[in-house]
């Protein structure tokens, strides 16, 4: 399976952070990417600068028949459509879509590293991913998601909140 993380911590012309994520999922679907599962929304402090607006994140499981590079190209087009500005690293953004795992493949090149190099360290990736696949294992370390979450420090495990809302997409 293929897993993506989608986040937002700024409003856009599409609405608030929740609206941005819902719109991004809808745009993926418009690209003929089959959405299999969608996690609940999770809210966490902005990283690394906690003074920035809080992030909302989800994880989604998708089916995609083309290459990871082609998927990344589609993601960049969607982020651009969602008014994402790539000025400063870790700056607030309307939409951020990351490939977390692409069918268990391991690849590290200039433009794309899979699995995502820091996914195993990020609460805002692990908790939503566990929401849709509690048996997921990291392709490199082969560690189960529960173990990766337990390795997070106390603060990281407790500063994230599962929200009641979830993405609703028409079938």
Image (spheres, rainbow, N blue to C red):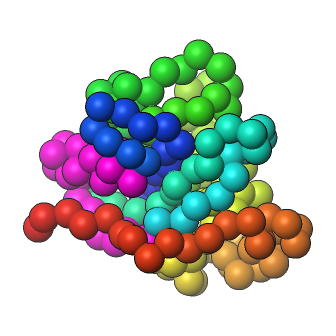
Residue sitting nearer the eye, 126 or 21: 21
Question: Residue 124's quadrant in the figure?
Answer: bottom right
Total marks placed? 0
Residue 58 x, y percent position in the rendering: 47, 61
Q: On the rendered image, what quadrant is the N terminus found in? A: bottom left
Farthest top residue in view: 87
For image coordinates 43% across by 48% down, the residue present is 17
Residue sitting nearer the eye, 37 or 1: 37
Question: Residue 80's quadrant in the figure?
Answer: top left
Q: Is 11 displayed left or right of 152 in the figure?
A: left
Q: Is residue 143 above or below residue 101?
A: below
Q: Is residue 159 above or below residue 119?
A: below
Residue 43 x, y percent position in the rendering: 58, 61
Q: Is 97 displayed left or right of 106 in the figure?
A: left
2 magenta-colored: no
Residue 162 x, y percent position in the rendering: 55, 73
On the question of residue 109 being in view, the answer is no
Q: Which residues are magenta?
A: 18-40
On the question of residue 18 being in view, the answer is yes
For image coordinates 40% across by 63% down, the residue present is 60
For image coordinates 11% across by 67% down, the residue present is 171
């Amino acid at each position: 399976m293929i897993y993506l993380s989608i986040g937002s911590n700024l409003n856009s012309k599409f609405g608030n952070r929740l609206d941005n994520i819902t719109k991004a999922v809808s745009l993926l679907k418009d690209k003929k990417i089959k959405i299999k599962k969608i996690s609940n929304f999770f809210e966490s402090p902005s990283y690394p600068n906690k003074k920035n607006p809080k992030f909302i994140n989800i994880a989604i499981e998708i089916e995609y028949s083309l290459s990871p590079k082609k998927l990344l190209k589609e993601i960049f087009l969607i982020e651009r459509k969602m008014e994402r500005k790539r000025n400063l690293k870790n700056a607030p953004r309307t939409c951020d879509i990351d490939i977390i795992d692409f069918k268990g493949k391991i690849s590290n090149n200039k433009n794309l590293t899979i699995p995502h190099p820091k996914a195993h360290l990020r609460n805002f990736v692990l908790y939503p991913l566990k929401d849709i696949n509690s048996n997921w294992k990291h392709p490199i370390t082969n560690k189960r998601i529960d173990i990766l979450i337990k390795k997070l420090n106390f603060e990281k495990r407790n500063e994230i909140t599962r929200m009641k809302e979830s993405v609703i997409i028409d079938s």
